[in-house]
Image (tube, rainbow, N blue to C red):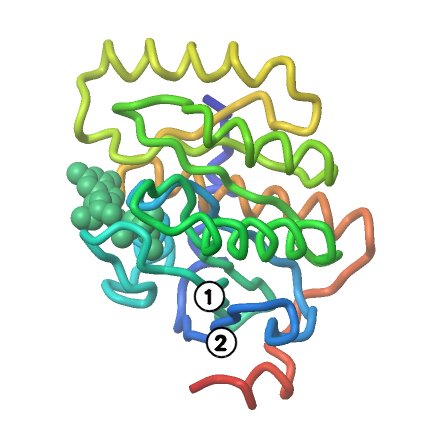
Amino acid sequence: MADFSAAEIEAGRRLFAGAWDFISAAGGLDSVPPMSGPEIAFAGRSNVGKSSLINALTGRRALARTSNTPGRTQQLIFFGGSGQLVLTDMPGYGYAAVAKSKVAAWTDLIHDYLRGRATLARVYVLIDARHGLKDVDDAILDTLSKAAVSHEIVLTKCDQIDEAALAERTEAVKVAIRKRPAAFPDLIATSARTGAGIDLLRAAVARLLAERGAKTGAKTGGMTDDMRGRQT
Ligand SMILES: Nc1nc2c(ncn2[C@@H]2O[C@H](COP(=O)(O)OP(=O)(O)O)[C@@H](O)[C@H]2O)c(=O)[nH]1
Ligand SMILES: [Mg+2]
């Protein structure tokens, strides 16, 4: 797993500290909030733990609604904090009991969003540590590669398997993504339940934004007035 300095861990902590709020939910591209600060998105199968991870990162118990009923989040959900960073909870995929037409609509939305969002700094693709990569995950990884969107795997629910199984799973996923150039070669193992790896994921985002800021000369600032107006 990637090494982070104490300064990066602290930068990560600060990046996610403070108040986080719901900005808006979008069922289509016409209703996504205007692009503002750098955005990171969380993708993954229904029930993989996207909402729980967002709650763990932001230290809020119910910012992103979590659910035992897979397939409930059918929209892109945007969250903003006191800084510029925007978090996007993406609609889950791979839930069998959903009608084909609905799957097509989600797929279109996800693909449009990934292609059209210049502020999107990285997509974290969540994989359940118990199950590893599945065919449906390959589909989103293919889409991300084609759209040349930077992405990294995050293992979720690591509290559910023992250390040896986690090491084995980590290695298997690493081998599988080695053939994907747009995929970050490392991955981060997390548990929203125990908090394991959450500080590392925060640090990874802080490092990403620092690198991106250095490239674009972007300054950090607050949420735009336009975004505030959209908060509910
Ligand atoms: N044991 C364990 N359960 C988790 C973890 N993260 C999420 N869950 C559970 O997995 C289910 C789905 O989580 P949710 O965040 O709603 O998944 P989403 O559909 O990807 O947004 C819920 O019952 C969560 O409590 C975790 O780190 N460990
Ligand atoms: Mg969710």
The answer to whether the residue bearing label 2 lies less than 8 angstroms from the nearest atom of ligand 2 is: no
Residue 53 in view of the camera: no
Residue on which the image places disc 1? 77
Q: Is residue 192 above or below residue 142?
A: below
Tag 2–tag 1 contact (CB < 8 Å): yes
Above or below for 176 versus 103:
above
Q: Earlier in the sequence, mark 2 or mark 1?
A: 2
Q: Secondary structure at mark 2?
A: strand
For the residue marked with disc 1, what is the amino acid? Ile
Residue wearing tag 2: 24
Separation of disc 2 and disc 1 at Cα? Answer: 6 Å
Q: Is residue 5 left or right of residue 73?
A: right
Residue 3 drawn at (x, y percent): 50, 26
Residue located 41% across and 49% down the image: 92
- Kindly identify which numbered label has been placed on residue 106: none
- The image position of residue 24, as x and y in percent, is 49, 76
The residue that appears at 60% across and 77% down in the rendered structure is 223
> Is residue 218 shown left or right of residue 154?
right
For residue 164, what is the image quadrant?
A: top left
- Residue 121 as seen in the image, left or right of residue 73: right
| Residue at image point 45% right, 48% down | 100
Q: Position of residue 106 (x, y in %)?
A: 51, 54
Q: Residues within 10 Å of mark 2 (few under 14, many from 20)?
A: some
Name the amino acid, label 2.
Answer: Ser
Which quadrant does the N terminus fall into? top left
Q: Secondary structure at mark 1?
A: strand
- Report the front residue among 118 and 44: 44
